[in-house]
Image (cartoon, helix red, strand yellow):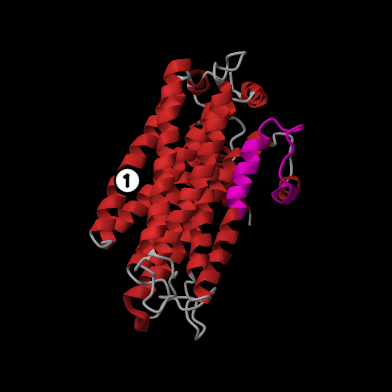
Amino acid sequence: MSSLTEPIHELQKHIRELKERVASVCLPRTPNLYVLRMAYAVVIANIVLIVSGGVVRLTGSGLGCDTWPKCTSSGSWTTTPEMGIHGLVEFGNRMLTFVLIIVTGLTFLSILRIAMPEASSLSQWWKKLFTGLSHSRHQYSDLFNLSLLLLWGIPIQAVVGGLSVLLKLNPWMVTAHYMLSAIMIALGACYLNRVRRYFASGVIESEGVLDSSLPQGAVFLKYLGWTSLVLVCFLIFMGTVTTGTGPHAGDPSAHRHAFNPWVVTRMHSFSVWAYLMVILSSLYLARKYQWSQALRRSWYWVLAVVVYQGVVGYIQFFNGLPVWLVEMHLLGSALFTWAAITAAERQLVMASQPSRRLAQQRRIV
């Protein structure tokens, strides 16, 4: 009997050591490179999901699984051979949701003990899944709450996606589905911005947030930031309406908007041109008032993505919306959301004295 006890104790010891190693990596107590990598990963994972959704729509596989939450009306949770390639494409897209759950869950765990160092039991953490953290009691409440919103966004997004299938790809439901995806990327962009600002070396210095006073022309910085946010929301929305009026419905039987394609396309393009004017105005004022180099880099990144989107958008429109160009435009839309929200969050923090003070307090020296 004693000969068996020793190997069992040894195995238990190895299991405890393995748990401790996993916990030290996935639940760090201090900010490290893993936290930053997961911040990037959660943004990229949401972009991949948008690209995958585009493949579903552009291959006509939107009803490859003809019901939800199961895949078939006959009761199967998975695709069947009779459903062919469309079933495989749609089911594969559904499976990517579980990848997103894993990535987002790991992102949430990576900040959990940093934001709640005082919590010693799972029950203390569990309660905060529904309430979030208050700013007055927790230094990194913003990181915890942003990652929590990303976590809760997944089931909400899944339900909206399921409803769009049940409603046979009604274009308004597809719009809601995409807008939620854009919100997820926006939340991820804000989270990444703040992780880099607080924990990455040299970022907060390059933003000029450590300066005691607001930059010159801060009022323009603030108004341009809010104007750009409004325009970003409108142009993304109009992009989905334009798509809902076009030929790529996700299924031949799906309902389409009855709007004039030229009118909605022009409204979408006009909003892009208006946003472009805001970016060019921001770059001009940045040079005039000597705003931070980090902010200018953000705007140049946005400008590059907008130019890419404009070129692809006009080419696809005048060439009958070929599938591969529409997919490139969809990828550009996801990258645009990331770039635009990154720039807007950065400039709104720089233009607000309370936000600057909070960032200074949260910075790891």
Q: Quadrant of the N terminus?
A: bottom right
Examine the structure image and report whether residue 103 is included in the region drawn in magenta: no
Q: Farthest residue in the bottom direction? A: 74
Magenta span: helix, strand or loop, mainly?
helix
Residue name at image x 51 percent, y 70 percent: 164
- Residue at x 51%, y 48% (from the top left corner): 233
In this picture, which residue range is highlighted in magenta?
127-152
Query: Up-down: is 132 above or below 168?
Result: above
Residue 279 falls in which quadrant of the image? top left
Residue 84 position by quadrant: bottom left
Query: Residue 278 vs residue 125: left or right?
Result: left
Image position, residue 353 (x, y; %)? 65, 22
Q: Residue at x 64, y 34 (%)?
A: 114
Q: Amino acid at mark 1?
A: Gly
Q: Is residue 327 above or below residue 119?
A: below
Towards the viewer: 120 or 160: 160
Q: Is residue 52 visible?
A: no
Instruction: Please say whether residue 133 is one of the residues in the magenta stretch.
Output: yes
